Image (cartoon, rainbow, N blue to C red):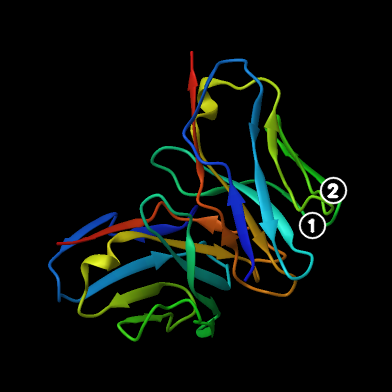
Amino acid sequence: GDSVTQMEGPVTLSEEAFLTINCTYTATGYPSLFWYVQYPGEGLQLLLKATKADDKGSNKGFEATYRKETTSFHLEKGSVQVSDSAVYFCALIMNRDDKIIFGKGTRLHILP
Amino acid sequence: GAGVSQTPSNKVTEKGKYVELRCDPISGHTALYWYRQSLGQGPEFLIYFQGTGAADDSGLPNDRFFAVRPEGSVSTLKIQRTERGDSAVYLCASSLGYSGANVLTFGAGSRLTVL
């Protein structure tokens, strides 16, 4: 079935470091792709999304590009901040479906 | 309300007991979703409501789980004869329409612990 695989955490970086969190997907068609973020004590929030191949989603300095050829949607940020510490979930939804399929999540710790 | 509200935030119960978890979605959101997040896992789909009806309940694990949304707003997830394996965070989300085209807003979740 359709699925999402993302790198295991925790990932620990120093402030201002470059961040990459890898995500690959398996799908029978062409899904829309998402990154959700869960800050401590808060609900899941949509961080960014891309709906077709080569689209780039961006928000709050984070970016991810929908790569059909490698079935990937890696999350990147050029300079992380302590406030970026959270759990990040890669996810997909198939066209005309109603259920989002999430990866297991990657916990990110940013040290000052 | 301003966001999706879930109650209780924490529930501890004994094996075999009945539990109800409540979700109050954003006003005007017709779509409502329940997900379950076990420790170390991503959220897993349980059920989707469009208005008052369950449009997709394929994620409910067995017949001990049931959910209602009688007036198309508040929803209740009901778990009968709870088992230790039911321990998880139960997440509710709402949106203006189905999740493929609309952004979901999640609540903070209800943490269920079955002893």
* Residue B5 position within the rendered picture, expressed as x and y whole percent measured from the top left: 40, 57
Disc 2: host chain:
A
Tell me the residue at 74%/63% (across/down): A31
Location of residue A90 with respect to A8 vertically, above or below: below
Q: How far is disc 1 from disc 2 in space, using C-alphas?
A: 7 Å
Q: Identify the secondary structure beneath mark 1.
A: loop
* Number of disc labels: 2
Q: Is residue A29 left or right of residue B47?
A: right
Marks 1 & 2, CB-CB < 8 Å contact: yes
Same chain for labels 1 and 2? Say yes or no. Answer: yes
Tell me the residue at 55%/56% (across/down): B105
Tell me the residue at 38%/55% (across/down): B109
Disc 1: host chain:
A
The dot on residue A55 is: 2
Tell me the residue at 62%/71% (across/down): A1
* Residue B97 position within the rendered picture, expressed as x and y whole percent measured from the top left: 65, 70
Closer to us: A80 or A4: A4
Mark 1 = which residue?
A51
